[in-house]
Image (cartoon, grey):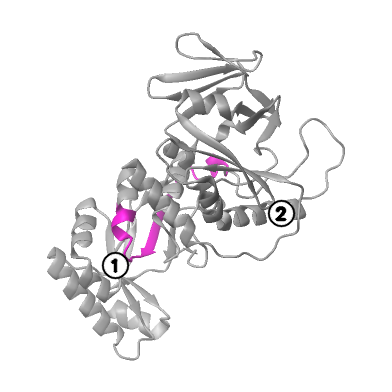
Amino acid sequence: MKRRAAALMFCFLLAFQLALPPAQAADRVYFTAVSGYVLPLSDNTMPFWSGGYVYIASSIFTGAARESLGISQVFNSDQGRLVLYSGGRSLTYTLSANCALDNDGVAYYPGAIQRNGTVFVPANTVSRYFDLVYSVIEVEHGSMVWLRQQDYKVSDKLYADAAQYSMNSVYADYIRAKESAPPESGSSGGSGRPVSPAEDPDPAGLEGKRVALCLQAGSSASTMADALESYDAGAAFFFTPEELERQGGTLRRLTAQGQSIGIFVDASDPERTVEEQLEAGNAALFRATCGKTRLAYLQDGGAQALQIAEEAGFRCLRPELDRSGYDLRSASGALELVRRLASWRGDAAVWLGEGASPAGLRAFLSAAKEAGGVCVAYTETGLR
């Protein structure tokens, strides 16, 4: 199962080998990658070498990366103590000591290092103790430290090639942050270097907010449902009449899972009217589930098309946030969406269109959960 997941993640990375506009060159950087995720890049969390060991930020053992590796972390700043744990095994780092202790009191060298408020741990020790694999790979702009499970059977070169799009994306974010950061006055501890805007958002900004993700459903709808089920989350799937005909099994699963189903209508279709598409969609949905919907999304629909649909008894999605022009296909995209929602006042329905992937959805659900948000289904009566 893990091997299959690794293969799927690799295919996801390979499928998005697109070139980004060139960014202004910066000093050599170190990317961090965990399984299929290239994490946001910032000076505060960038890996570094010390004493012949490469150190990684302990903060990577959170969110989607934590889910991928199966390792969690707890840091007590008052006691200067970091604990990494997985199942019944743990490593405890005390910042004043040059080693870590396992459950039996066995020491592992070297210890952790704290820089600019971030605790870093040696990749070698963590990988050996928790049965992981890590590589340091030469890539464009610098190097990449890549951690994954033992059964993630992809070579360093293939992974680096497949991850190029994600690296270009986080590198571009990093450069933009450096260019837009105001110059610092004076110096007092810390590096004084800017943090990428894709860094984890302020958790308080999403606490208690309800978020209704709305997606244009396609062939990956069933895999999206897997992600939602694993996080006990809700969403709304909008199918074209043709997809409603083809995906009877997925429709029955979504219905049983409590997800919302809507009809995606192309109001500019020269062959079928809005009413005809709505009728065809509901007919297909009824054949699959013995139920109908009153939820619809109208693409290219003006006021007249909306009026027609609403007079027929449908509730047309009018999202607070339209994110169809932004990809939700990586950890960086997920954190950017969380950051955007954290700045939004109140609950929000978010239209993602076709821009989401199962991996990006999982990353968002994990980040939103940690930030205190609740993902709910959008229904005929609004957010549920």
Image location of residue 71, percent across then percent down:
45, 30
* 3 over 225 or under it: above or below: above
Q: Quadrant of residue 373?
A: top left
Residue at which label 2 appears: 175
At 39% from the left and 54% from the top, the residue drawn is: 358
At 23% from the left and 70% from the top, the residue drawn is: 244
Q: Disc 1 marks which amino acid?
A: Gly
Q: Between residues 350 and 134, which one lies in front from this camera angle?
A: 134
Q: Quadrant of residue 110?
A: top right
Q: Please state which of the two labelled residues, at mark 1 or mark 2, is closer to the viewer.
A: 2
User: What mark, if any, has residue 320 been given in the picture?
Assistant: none
Q: How far apart are labels 1 and 2 at the CA level?
A: 40 Å
Q: Viewed as shown, does residue 108 lie left or right of 309? A: right
Classify the position of the C terminus by image quarter: bottom left
Please check the rendered image and state whether residue 365 is part of the magenta-colored stretch, yes or no.
no
Q: Which residue lies furthest to the right in this view?
A: 186
User: What mark, if any, has residue 262 been given in the picture?
Assistant: 1
Looking at the image, is mark 1 or mark 2 earlier in the sequence? 2
Image location of residue 140, percent across then percent down:
66, 53
Callout 2: SS: helix
Q: Between residues 63 and 105, which one lies in front from this camera angle?
A: 105
Q: Viewed as shown, does residue 272 lie left or right of 191? A: left
Q: Disc 2 marks which amino acid?
A: Ile
Q: What stretch is highlighted in magenta?
A: 201-225
* 218 over 192 or under it: above or below: below
At 44% from the left and 52% from the top, the residue drawn is: 10
